[in-house]
Amino acid sequence: MVPGELGALLERCRADEATAWERFAVWVRERGRAVYRGVHRLTDADRDDAVAETLTSLVTAVRRGEIRGASNAEIDAYVCTALRRRALNVLRGLARRPEVSREAPGDGTGPTPSAPRDAADGGSSQDIQAIAAELLGRAEKLLLSWPADDRYLFIAKLNGVSSRVIQETLEQPPFRCFTSIATVDTRFHRLRRRLIDHIQEP
């Protein structure tokens, strides 16, 4: 994906280009599959519902210009955060709802309630998910308080982008920030430390 491609796509969506909306929907579904791949407690139907609901909210966010960031990495981070939050909401709902399991066919007992997932997991998944959501919110708030070049550098490094590519991207608009490769690595470690310290604050 070339620099600025997602930003240009959002601009086309705001101009109500049908092909742009179709491309945006396809991209969000692709990101949803990637984000939810490791969430084993979601069924395929849960994942489809979560992506569809996230897409609906993102359409509103795009129309209102609420998606922050100009770089591909920043826009991708915004969308992935929205997808994760929706998944947390789905998981909270599942944690509150007792599961129903069926006995072996032909035994005549019919559906019987099974132990809630919380008990099977040995802890309160609802509490764990609430804590995770709070930490995610704190991390996002801190990230959004950083300058755009810091946000891009940090998110790009987390997504495995090389320091050289980050350096070259920072030299281009909208950043126009000239730095060395060694400084890219130093800035990333400093920003990561700030984020960890912020999350661990009582």
Image (cartoon, rainbow, N blue to C red):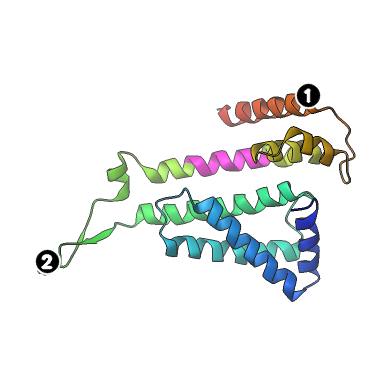
As rendered, which of 12 and 159 lies closer to the eye?
A: 159
Question: Residue 182 shows which numbered tag?
Answer: 1
x and y percent of residue 193 in the render? Answer: 65, 25
Label 2: which secondary element: loop
| The quarter of the displayed image where residue 172 is located | top right
Disc 2 marks a residue whose amino acid type is Thr
Instruction: Decide: is 62 above or below 19.
Output: above
Q: Is residue 170 left or right of residue 38?
A: right
Which label was assigned to residue 109?
2
Q: CA distance from mark 2 to mark 1?
A: 67 Å
- Outermost residue to the bottom: 18
Q: Is residue 140 magenta?
A: yes
Give me the residue at 74% from left, 66% from top: 63
Q: Main secondary structure of the magenta part?
A: helix
Q: State which tag comes first along the sequence, 2 or 1.
A: 2
Q: Secondary structure at mark 1?
A: helix
**Residue 187 at what x, y percent from top left?**
75, 27
| Viewport quadrant of the C terminus | top right
130 sits to left or right of 158: left
